[in-house]
Image: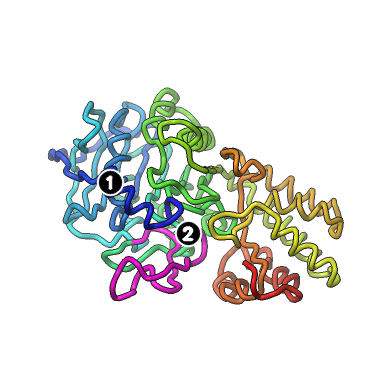
Amino acid sequence: MRNKTLATVLLAGVSLYAPLTASYAADAPGPQAPKEWTLLVYLNGHNNLDSFGALNINQMEQVGSTKDINIVVQWASAGVPSTKRLLVKKDNDTNNVTSPIVQDMGKVDMGDYRTMVEFVKWGVANYPAKKYFLDVWDHGSGWHMMNLNPMARPDNTLFGGFQPMDISWDDDSGNHITTQQLGQALNESAKAIGHKVDLYASDACLMAMAEVANEMSNSVEIYAGSEEVEPAAGWPYDQLMKRWAAKPTATAAEVGSILADEYVKSYNGGENGNSDATYSVFDMSKLSALSGAVAAFGAKLEKLDANGRRQVVSAASSSTSFDYSDYVDLGDFLTQVAATRVVDPGLINGVRTAANDFVVANHVTAKYSKAKGVSIWLPTSQDTFNEYADKYKTMQFDQVTHWSDALKFVLQDATSSRR
């Protein structure tokens, strides 16, 4: 999700950005020489973030597509009866979306991963580039489901009880894209491109997790996301595009780092005011080393005595966590565990080094000064572990690291009343 609560997002969207009218002009795509980059924005506004979609597209239009960078958006809006594909062009109108529609798709399910894949294929065919940046815009909840009281639909098919909502929630269909489906979508997208997706980033909450990244380990070069929830306004697309357009030959890591820097600055007294914010960039070529280090660390945890296990759980409870308290910053957890002296410092340093190599950029506001950029699942109660363990075991990260085995062992003495 974006923002602290969905109710806050809803109220903010209605009061600040209610106008959704757009000025449309026909402009069919045609053959063109490959540019340096194509940015593909999968903007799912079939939910209560809808009005912020118009805000963000207007920010993109402050720069627009350039001779080196295509900006293409698949825009599903609750305020418009059909989904549009836009080629974003520069304009001087900050209140209305004026970029031309290049395709009117009718009603589509943005919670279906196959819809995302088709958008990528279409974008590659019509707006070829040397490098591709895929941005998924919507609510997100990391790798697992979220727990909310019924609030959005009277039939309780969405947002009621425990529903799996990993990313791209479509209120109209009631569907979403699971973490595994997101990985499959990126795999198919890489095939369409002919090489790995150069940069994947989520304009959504809680996605800077080792578990999520691992699902696309063979299909993405650079991955970016937020450890914490995102405020409803999301990325400052105007500032991102201004800096990127000034250096169109930037590498994927450089573009990701520009995004992370501008995003956090925008919420640290910048154009989006003051809110807690985090944003990270991962070098996916370093993920296997991190997974191996976590596996070795977990195997050591499984040899601890009862006192050692209790100290590790206490360390986890003291570590920096996020809106879901079982999502914990790995780097801060390592610092807390090191202080207990129950684990070999060499193993801890091995994980820390691998994590530092994996995280190529980490920008945070003051509240998250101890966060190092990548979070992992770290429940501190048996209840939370039992609630999600079956799903966790299906994740590629767990199949490589066996992290759930370590968690199960460490939590055997834990209470069932904590996170």
Magenta-tinted stretch: 142-169
Image quadrant of residue 112? bottom left
Q: Residue at x 73, y 55 (%)?
A: 293
User: Label 2 belongs to which residue?
Assistant: 141
Q: Is residue 158 magenta?
A: yes
Q: Is residue 6 left or right of residue 22?
A: right
Residue 242 disc label: none
Mark 2 crowdedness (10 Å alpha carbons): few <14, some 14-19, many ≥20: many
Above or below 162: residue 346? above
Give coordinates of residue 29: x percent, y percent. Answer: 21, 40
Along the viewing direction, whichever of 96 and 177 lies nearer the viewer: 96
Please report contact status of discs 1 and 2: CB closer than 8 Å, yes or no: no
Tell me which secondary structure the magenta stretch mostly adopts: loop
User: Label 1 belongs to which residue?
Assistant: 15
Q: Is residue 297 left or right of residue 135?
A: right
Image quadrant of residue 110? bottom left
Along the viewing direction, whichever of 270 and 123 lies nearer the viewer: 270
Give coordinates of residue 310: x percent, y percent. Answer: 79, 67
In the orientation shown, which residue stands out farthest toward the top?
Answer: 246
Q: Residue at x 43, y 29 (%)?
A: 244
Mark 1 crowdedness (10 Å alpha carbons): few <14, some 14-19, many ≥20: few
Of circles 1 and 2, which is in front? 1
